[in-house]
Amino acid sequence: MKKSKHIGVRFVLAWIFGVLFILVGAVSLADSVIGGLLIILGAIIILPPFGEFIEKKYHYHPSGWLKLVLFLILVGIGTSLASTAHYGAAEVTTYSASQETTNTIKKLLQKVKGGTIIIDKATVTLGNLYPIRITIVNAGDVSFKPQYDIYAIDSSGTTVCEGSALFSGLEILKPGEKRTEEIQILGCIFNKDGDYTIEVDMLDEDFNKIASAEKMITVNFWGQFEIN
């Protein structure tokens, strides 16, 4: 079975900026042939097919940072050559725009941490909250060890119990990875029947919230002890 390709933020941005600067290089050919060609070459380097070609042809996988550095160098030199035909304020404006574009690219190509969480099942037995089954997905570009905060909230919005899940944060969740597991907190007892909202927050190792999910449950335990 053919393995599906992970499409992340860097993959999409590489295509956007690659095509954009190919067009910029084509326009710059009118001012400087060499400058325009350097910009086009720099743009081709950050396109995903270039890395796949190098890896297939020479069995070498160029890193994202290497491609970014080569792109910035070639585009910087090409932009400088293409702008030599302009003078005074026009030259200063071109330089400033080039620097701003470089800073924007660096910021956008930074690795992104993200994910999703779904509560598949929340079990209540004898008025107690038992293990919660969740499905999580790492939808970002960075691996992390997921941890969880669990809250039980009644219909009035009052938190009746909360805590951090036991034994969480032990296994790394890699980019694109999906898994289902059970989590639990101790001592979460519902003192009366009714509807409750179970909220689970997924955190990284630094306790930054990555994603959150909710599920409604109904407690129907205490009514059997009522005396008519």
Image (tube, rainbow, N blue to C red):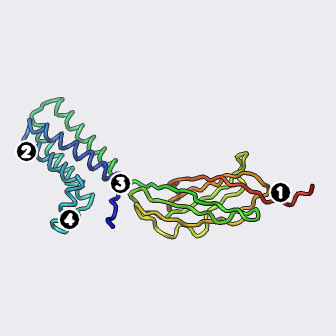
Image x and y of residue 63, in percent: 26, 61
On the image, numbered disc 3 is attached to which residue?
Answer: 8
Label 2, secondary structure: give it: helix
Sequence order check, earlier mark of 2 and 4: 2
Report the amino acid beneath label 1. Answer: Gly
Image x and y of residue 95, in percent: 20, 38
> Crowdedness of circle 2 by 10 Å Cα count: few (<14), some, many (20+)?
some
Label 4, secondary structure: give it: helix
On the image, numbered disc 2 is attached to which residue?
Answer: 34
Q: Compute the Cα span from label 3 to label 4.
A: 19 Å
Question: For the residues carrying marks 4 and 1, which lies nearer the camera in this image?
Answer: 1
Relative side of 91 to 121, left or right: left
On the image, numbered disc 4 is attached to which residue?
Answer: 55
Number of numbered labels in the structure image:
4
Image x and y of residue 152, in percent: 68, 55
In which image quadrant can residue 219 be found? bottom right
Q: Compute the Cα span from label 2 to label 4.
A: 27 Å
Could you say which disc has been placed on residue 223 in the image?
Answer: 1
Sequence order check, earlier mark of 2 and 1: 2
Report the amino acid beneath label 4. Answer: Glu
